[in-house]
Image: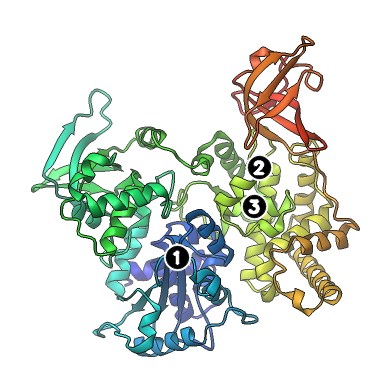
């Protein structure tokens, strides 16, 4: 008879198609998946590349079985993520996690050798080494807020004592911690990742808000000591329960001005914190008093992520929090409409990044349904997981069938905006840069489906070793080549021809024709890369992935020209006002950063004064340095872009 953890492990092998691997290697992958899923629940379900990167199999460092890095609480999946974070936050705080299922003493020796020999410009390094090398390069070290924190995770350690490094090695780090994990502890982590969590809160002051006639449940206003809040949102290892923030519309914003102010209040005026802070909102399946405490089933902190993260950081930094109290609104309800209303209401009162609300827009909900209603012949159905872990309870849907918003926007930037060199960037960076070009009301869903289909199925071919392993880092380039070689240049996303283009491409890939197409693309990529290096010089074999010049070279090799269409991109915005000019003809301005954009009746004969305040789609034409909007169309409530009649 198997226990629960063994059953979960067998299910993991099935979900990730690991039947051909040894159980020992699969167990290492399972432990890495479960432990590091605590940092961003659901991320590893839809990002197999990141999971592959975390699971280290290095002959030089055989006792390092997992490597996972954070900067300012953000996961580093690319070296370029560091630049994006430092551009936003100015200063960086680095956390380095190394996991072993072997000897702690042997791991310690290998870590000391690793940091002693770490090189910024090593050739053919694994990605985790590239990220670590760059994070500890002189350029980045100058932007550190403090020395990195080192966390050593040891699984099944028995009765070993904690590792106490000595000598010069200690000077590299601000702190060194050892986290011991056994099977019982791993089971707790699995439960936490699945949000099977019951918490107990103790507070001195509370007030009941009855459910009323609607009977949505019970709600309380409480004054919670900081210590109780830390217990609520921390694991037994002292790690932040990040899945408790799944329903929060924005993640921690790092060391922003607001967060620095919160930290200053915690340090200087702890007793006044409850007066200066707006408090937090917690929703859960049920909340009830029990033996002087309050029991919360599956709690979610839906507002106050910044407050909670700063209190947690202060606690980890050793700041005394005895006098700190936090006002909390706690709602126990099983009704989804109540929970969603609380999430929206609680966050409308604060400045929230536009990207945080992106996937709750109607376009994404309709796109999710479109995925569910379609399937390519000969392939498994794919799903758009626009909300973290939304399909987690459906055991029939495997991880390789789900694409997240991150994967979707990255593949769309690569395939339909032809900016493959940008496609590895963080999803919020891409949305900020390309929000006027993607996920536009009125766009067809077909190109988004095609991009997701290629993204997921090419990843499967790499994982099953049916494509050259050394090209896995160029997966987006391979996908772009497949699209261009099979279908030719794609129409603009706003074109009426885009559906036909996508239909023809998908029909050509039906019934297992994707693999030969992918192999042809890999061969073409290798030929183009070799020609690039011969023409430019050996030094140009590095940095290809994020090179605009290489992308232009690649497109020219396929089509004979690198010229890209311009002026066909569709934008959206709100009309600021419409008025008459001195010639008694209508003109107006559409809100746009950094400058509003002009439009005129000559280009838009259907326009009238009722356009004021309406959401519109439009295209841009340029005359020298001047821009104006043409084809301005009101976007109706049903999500379509229509001409006003």
Mark 3 highlights which residue? 452
**Residues at badges 1 and 2 in contact (C-beta under 8 Å)?**
no
Q: Which mark is residue 438?
A: 2
Q: Residue 341's x, y, as percent?
A: 38, 32
Q: Is residue 632 found left or right of 150 in the rendered image?
A: right
**Residues at badges 1 and 3 in contact (C-beta under 8 Å)?**
no
Q: Residue 389's x, y, as percent?
A: 45, 52
Q: Is residue 46 found left or right of 500 in the rendered image?
A: left
**Which circle, 1 or 3, is nearer the viewer?**
1
Q: For mark 3, give the secondary structure.
A: helix
Q: For mark 1, give the secondary structure.
A: strand
Instruction: Report how many numbered discs are placed on residues in the image.
Output: 3
**Residues at badges 2 and 3 in contact (C-beta under 8 Å)?**
no
Classify 10 Å Cα crowding around label 3: few (below 14), some (14-19), many (20 and above).
Answer: many
Classify 10 Å Cα crowding around label 2: few (below 14), some (14-19), many (20 and above).
Answer: many
Separation of marks 2 and 3 at Cα, in angstroms: 14 Å
Classify 10 Å Cα crowding around label 1: few (below 14), some (14-19), many (20 and above).
Answer: some
| Above or below, 24 relative to 379 | below
Q: Is residue 337 found left or right of 432 in the rendered image?
A: left
Residue at 41 percent across and 65 percent down: it is: 145
Separation of marks 1 and 3 at Cα, in angstroms: 27 Å
Q: For mark 2, give the secondary structure.
A: loop
Mark 1 highlights which residue? 70
Residue 66: image quadrant is bottom left
Separation of marks 1 and 2 at Cα, in angstroms: 29 Å
Q: Quadrant of the C terminus?
A: top right
Residue toward you, 1 or 316:
316
**Which circle, 1 or 2, is nearer the viewer?**
1
Toward the right, the furthest residue is 560
| Above or below, 604 relative to 340 | above
Q: Earlier in the sequence, mark 1 or mark 3?
A: 1
């Amino acid at each position: 008879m198997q226990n629960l953890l063994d059953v979960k492990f067998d299910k993991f092998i099935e979900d990730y198609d690991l039947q051909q691997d040894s159980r020992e290697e699969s167990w290492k992958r399972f432990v890495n998946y479960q432990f590091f899923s605590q940092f961003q629940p659901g991320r590893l379900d839809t990002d197999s590349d990141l999971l592959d990167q975390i699971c280290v199999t290095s002959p030089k460092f055989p006792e390092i079985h997992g490597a996972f890095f954070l900067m300012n609480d953000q996961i580093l999946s690319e070296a370029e993520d560091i630049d994006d974070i430092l551009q936003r936050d100015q200063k960086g705080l680095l956390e380095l996690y190394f996991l072993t299922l072997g000897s702690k003493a042997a791991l310690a020796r290998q870590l000391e050798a690793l940091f002693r020999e770490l090189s910024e410009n090593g050739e053919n390094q694994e990605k985790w080494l590239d990220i670590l090398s760059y994070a500890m390069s002189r350029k980045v070290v100058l932007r550190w807020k403090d020395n990195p924190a080192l966390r050593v995770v040891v699984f099944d350690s028995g009765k070993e004592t904690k590792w106490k490094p000595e000598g010069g090695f200690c000077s590299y780090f601000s702190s060194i911690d050892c986290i011991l994990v056994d099977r019982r502890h791993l089971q707790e982590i699995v439960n936490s990742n699945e949000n099977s969590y019951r918490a107990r809160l103790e507070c001195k002051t509370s007030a009941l808000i009855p459910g009323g006639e609607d009977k949505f449940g019970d709600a309380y206003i409480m004054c919670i000591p900081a210590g109780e809040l830390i217990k609520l949102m921390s694991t037994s290892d002292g790690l932040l329960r990040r899945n408790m923030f799944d329903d929060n519309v924005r993640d921690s914003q790092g060391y922003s001005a607001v967060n620095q102010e919160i930290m200053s209040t915690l340090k200087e005026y702890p007793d006044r914190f409850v007066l200066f802070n707006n408090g937090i909102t917690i929703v859960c399946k049920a909340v009830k008093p029990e033996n002087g405490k309050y029991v919360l089933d599956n709690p979610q902190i839906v507002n106050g992520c910044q407050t909670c993260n700063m209190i947690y950081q202060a606690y980890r930094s050793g700041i005394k929090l005895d006098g700190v109290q936090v006002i909390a609104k706690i709602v126990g309800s099983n009704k989804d409409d109540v929970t969603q209303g609380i999430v929206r209401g609680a966050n409308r009162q604060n400045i929230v990044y536009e990207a945080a609300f992106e996937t709750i827009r109607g376009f994404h909900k309709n796109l999710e349904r479109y995925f569910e209603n379609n399937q390519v012949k000969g392939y498994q159905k794919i799903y758009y997981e626009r909300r973290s872990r939304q399909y987690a309870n459906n055991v029939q849907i495997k991880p390789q069938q789900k694409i997240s918003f991150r994967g979707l926007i990255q593949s769309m930037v690569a395939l339909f905006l032809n900016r493959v060199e940008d496609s590895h960037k963080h999803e919020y960076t891409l949305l900020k840069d390309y929000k006027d070009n993607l996920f536009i009301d009125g766009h067809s869903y077909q190109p988004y489906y095609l991009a997701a289909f290629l993204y997921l199925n090419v990843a499967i071919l790499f994982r099953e070793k049916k494509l050259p392993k050394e090209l896995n880092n160029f997966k987006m380039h391979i996908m772009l080549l497949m699209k261009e070689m099979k279908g030719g240049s794609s129409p603009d996303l706003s074109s009426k021809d885009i559906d036909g283009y996508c239909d023809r491409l998908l029909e050509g890939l039906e019934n297992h024709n994707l693999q030969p197409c992918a192999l042809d693309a890999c061969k073409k990529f290798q030929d183009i890369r070799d020609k690039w290096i011969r023409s430019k010089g050996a030094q140009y074999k590095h940095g290809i992935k994020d090179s605009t010049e290489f992308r232009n070279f690649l497109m020219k090799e396929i089509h004979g020209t690198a010229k890209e269409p311009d002026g066909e991109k569709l934008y959206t915005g709100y009309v600021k006002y419409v008025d008459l000019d001195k010639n008694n003809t209508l003109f107006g301005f559409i809100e746009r950063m950094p400058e509003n954009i002009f439009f005129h009746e000559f280009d838009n004969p259907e326009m009238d004064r009722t356009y004021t305040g309406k959401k519109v789609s439009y295209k841009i034409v340029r005359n020298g340095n001047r821009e104006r909007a043409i084809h301005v169309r009101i976007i109706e409530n049903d999500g379509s872009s229509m001409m006003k009649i």
